[in-house]
Image (tube, rainbow, N blue to C red):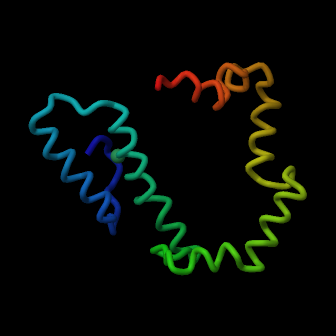
Amino acid sequence: MFCNEPLPKCPSPHFEHDSRGFAKRQRVEREIPWQERIEYCNRHRAETRIFPLGLQAGYPATIDYNQVLERVRSDEMNKVLIRLIESPCSSASFKSCAAEIAAAPNSRKWSSELSPVKTIRKIPG
Ligand SMILES: [Zn+2]
């Protein structure tokens, strides 16, 4: 719709709903705002490229919400969470953030002005 990438083979109902909505809007509006196009194409890309890889790797196609609490409380999940609490530096996310900070230690991205706490305080009301 907004790019030339192929469409997902099995689009989700959410993707189909968005596609129909944008098709309808494009007939009326001159241009869909770029933020909405990016959001749509991120889902488009995820459903075309990333979801099939996850399914191929054995991830479930749907979330069984009745099992989530039991899974979170399972020994397996507890081991992962305790390992993260006791050794946060071992997490892939932590390592990725540390590498980003090391590569650009003076980036404005890390300044206190852009910290979530200050940003939230700037929101009126
Ligand atoms: Zn797209």
Residue that extends furthest to the right in the rendered view of this protein: 86
How many numbered dots are placed on residues in this image? Answer: 0
Looking at this view, is 68 or 107 the one in front? 68
Q: Position of residue 14 (x, y in %)?
A: 31, 59
Q: Residue 6: which quarter of the image?
A: bottom left
In percent of the image, x 59 and y 25: which residue is there? 121
Please, is residue 59 above or below residue 41 in the view? Answer: below
Q: Position of residue 123 (x, y in %)?
A: 50, 25
Q: With 122 as the anchor, is 103 left or right in this view? A: right
In percent of the image, x 16 and y 40: which residue is there? 25
In percent of the image, x 75 and y 44: which residue is there? 96
Please, is residue 18 above or below residue 27 in the view? Answer: below
Q: Residue 119: which quarter of the image?
A: top right
Q: With 95 as the anchor, is 64 left or right in this view? A: left
Instruction: State the quadrant of the N terminus.
Output: top left
Q: Position of residue 16 (x, y in %)?
A: 26, 59
Q: With 71 as the anchor, is 97 left or right in this view? A: right
Looking at this view, is 28 or 63 the one in front? 63
Looking at this view, is 123 or 4 the one in front? 123
Please, is residue 102 above or below residue 113 in the view? Answer: below
In percent of the image, x 33 and y 38: which residue is there? 37
